[in-house]
Image (spheres, rainbow, N blue to C red):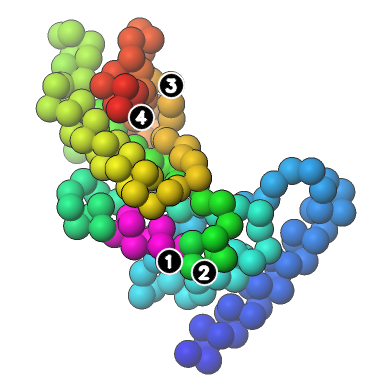
Amino acid sequence: AAFRRFCEDYFSSVWNKAVTDIKKYDPNHLIGNRLGLFSPRTVAFNFALKHVDFNSLEGYTVGLGEEDYHVSCANTAVMNMLGNNKPLIWSEVGMSVTGMTNNGLFWDHENEEPFDYMQKRSTDYMSQFVKMFKTMNVNGAAPWWWPGGFRMVEMSDCGFCGPTGKLRPIGEVY
């Protein structure tokens, strides 16, 4: 507990100085902090939250399913409590229609389209997040890579539209 408190106080002072310095030169732009999900391994929960204009949680670590839906709701509630109800957005929300693995690529090469089951999975995932956004009154979202197309470096495609520009079901849900 003492170590966590030390981290909290130290990182808070660093964030306070950084935000104060930035605001001296640019008082107009909003400053935010993006966090992963809260877990027992999180060293300090709110060191940056009191210094920034808005808060953000990362969605890519949330899975698909009822338990994960409840995890996203709980993380939203915790962030709102710790962040004193400052605006909250979820960023990097998305599930790749090609998978995200170096073990293979799930893609219909013949038709140059994702497989239907992968599109359904991705769409169900976004539906789960949209439900949470509405239930928890989330202020905004920044889904992962809005434009479609395969991303070689991550072996992924989380786009709302395909490489041809055709809107995917995930885009309609969002």
Find numbered disc 4 in the image and state the secondary structure of the residue it sits on.
Answer: loop
Neighbour tally class for label 2: few under 14, some 14-19, many 20 plus, Cα within 10 Å: some
Q: Which residues are magenta?
A: 71-79
The residue carrying mark 3 is: 147
Alpha carbon separation for disc pair 1 and 4: 24 Å
- Residue 22 left/right relative to 150: right
Q: Position of residue 120 (x, y in %)?
A: 17, 28
Near-viewer residue (157 or 71):
71
The residue carrying mark 2 is: 82
Q: Amino acid at mark 2?
A: Leu
Near-viewer residue (81 or 115):
81
Tags 1 and 2 touching, CB below 8 Å: yes
Q: Residue at x 66, y 72 (%)?
A: 12
Q: How many marks?
A: 4
Q: Residue at x 52, y 51 (%)?
A: 88
In the picture, the disc for residue 78 is 1
Residue 128 figure quarter: top left
Q: Could you tell which of marks 2 and 4 lies nearer the N-terminus?
A: 2
- Is residue 168 visible in the rendered structure shown here? yes
- Spot the residue most to the bottom: 2
